[in-house]
């Protein structure tokens, strides 16, 4: 707990000093990004999940998950989560992590990257977060014999088509045209794309839950300041009802995300990890849609303006739903897995969580 407090306290101090939402909103040129990333790097936070002997900080999974929740509360728009995830992926094959921004590929269930006979990479991966800003990519690739490898790639060797997600952050298409990797090693036994997507789903769930907490705080504060018909709008029953629903969605998302994080941090069995991660992504994605609508309804027209900070949280929470498998993808896959295991296995699994 003490370590977690240190990690989160350090991150929140950096976020508060260098990632204030109103300051970022006013900075149209993005000058805030460089000092923020420098401070995060000096604190060792981007490589939290990388062991010290591989160039990282050696932070536990649990402490790293707590850090991501804090990043979600500030709607951080730099590749902190992506670099942490990339470092974690490289660590699975004991590949040392380089300095600087990283991201991972693939970031969805439909894309594949192939290892050719000459050990170069081919393929295309869409919706890769912050690929345009990344210096390196951690890639999960398969060869024609079904063997999975973890690969470190210089981002400049790839063709990157820049796109933006709903929150205005990079969500790019990366093409590997016989790209020669910097390092390539076999993935651990049983580690595949689903393993990466499940971890990514937990990461995004925590970020969504964090952003919902901020949406609630901002909406409650606004309702206590805004006056209509000579009284604060927080006194109106309809507004109170909406805020209660928003609080409920925030609490549900936080419970689902932290439960999944606890399962991964404690090394739960594979079936439990699948249930927790898939359920968290489904529930947090549903909550993001409902909470964003309520928060904007409470704020009225002012919440839709580009000058207001609310959209930094709502749009990113909505955008994060699509990364590492959408809620519909996980709902279908979870249903298939439950059906395959049989009815007798469902209740013991659910009850054990």
Image: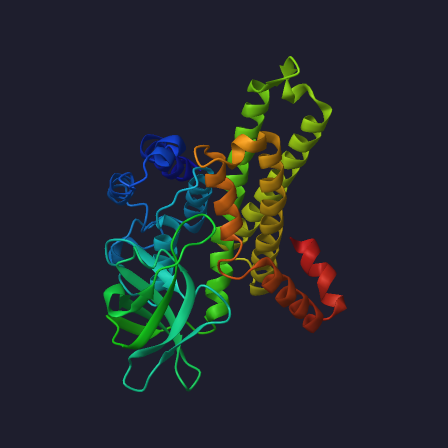
> Which image quarter: residue 178?
bottom left
Is residue 211 at all visible to an observer of this figure? yes
In the picture, the quarter occupied by the N terminus is top left
Residue 307 image point, x, y percent:
43, 33
Residue 36 image point, x, y percent:
29, 40
In the displayed structure, 316 sits above or below 305; it is below
In the displayed structure, 158 sits above or below 135; it is below
Residue 11 image point, x, y percent:
36, 37
The front one of 192 and 160 is: 160
Going 64% across and 21% down the picture, which residue do you hit?
233
> Which image quarter: residue 222?
top right
In the displayed structure, 222 sits above or below 6; it is above
Going 56% across and 60% down the picture, which residue do you hit?
326
In the displayed structure, 263 sits above or below 77; it is below
The front one of 229 and 323 is: 229
Going 71% across and 70% down the picture, which residue do you hit?
339
């Amino acid at each position: 707990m003490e370590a977690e407090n240190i990690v989160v306290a350090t991150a929140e101090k950096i976020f508060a000093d260098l990632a204030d939402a109103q300051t970022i909103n006013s900075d149209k040129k993005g000058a805030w990004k460089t000092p923020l990333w420098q401070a995060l790097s000096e604190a060792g936070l981007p490589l939290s999940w990388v062991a010290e002997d591989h160039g990282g900080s050696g932070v536990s999974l649990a402490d790293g998950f707590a850090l991501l929740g804090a990043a979600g509360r500030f709607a951080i728009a730099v590749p902190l989560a992506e670099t942490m995830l990339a470092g974690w992926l490289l660590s699975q094959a004991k590949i040392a992590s380089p300095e600087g921004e990283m991201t991972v590929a693939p970031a969805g269930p439909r894309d594949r990257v192939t290892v050719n006979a000459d050990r170069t990479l081919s393929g295309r991966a869409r919706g890769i977060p912050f690929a345009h800003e990344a210096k390196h990519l951690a890639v999960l690739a398969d060869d024609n014999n079904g063997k999975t490898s973890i690969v470190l790639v210089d981002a400049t060797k790839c063709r990157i088509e820049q796109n933006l997600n709903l929150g205005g952050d990079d969500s790019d298409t990366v093409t590997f045209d016989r790209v020669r990797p910097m390092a390539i090693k076999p993935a651990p036994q049983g580690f595949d794309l689903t393993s990466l997507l499940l971890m990514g789903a937990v990461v995004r769930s925590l970020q969504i839950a964090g952003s919902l907490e901020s949406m609630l705080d901002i909406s409650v504060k606004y309702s206590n300041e805004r006056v209509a018909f000579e009284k604060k709008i927080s006194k109106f029953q309809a507004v109170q009802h909406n805020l209660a629903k928003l609080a409920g969605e925030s609490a549900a998302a936080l419970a689902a995300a932290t439960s999944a994080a606890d399962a991964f941090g404690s090394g739960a069995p594979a079936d439990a990890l699948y249930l927790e991660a898939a359920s968290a992504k489904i529930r947090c994605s549903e909550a993001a849609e409902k909470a964003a609508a309520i928060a904007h309804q409470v704020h009225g027209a002012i919440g839709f303006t580009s000058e207001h900070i609310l959209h930094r949280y709502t749009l990113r929470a909505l955008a994060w739903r699509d990364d590492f498998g959408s809620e519909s993808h996980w709902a279908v896959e979870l249903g298939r897995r439950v059906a395959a295991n049989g009815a007798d296995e469902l209740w013991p699994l659910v009850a054990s969580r």
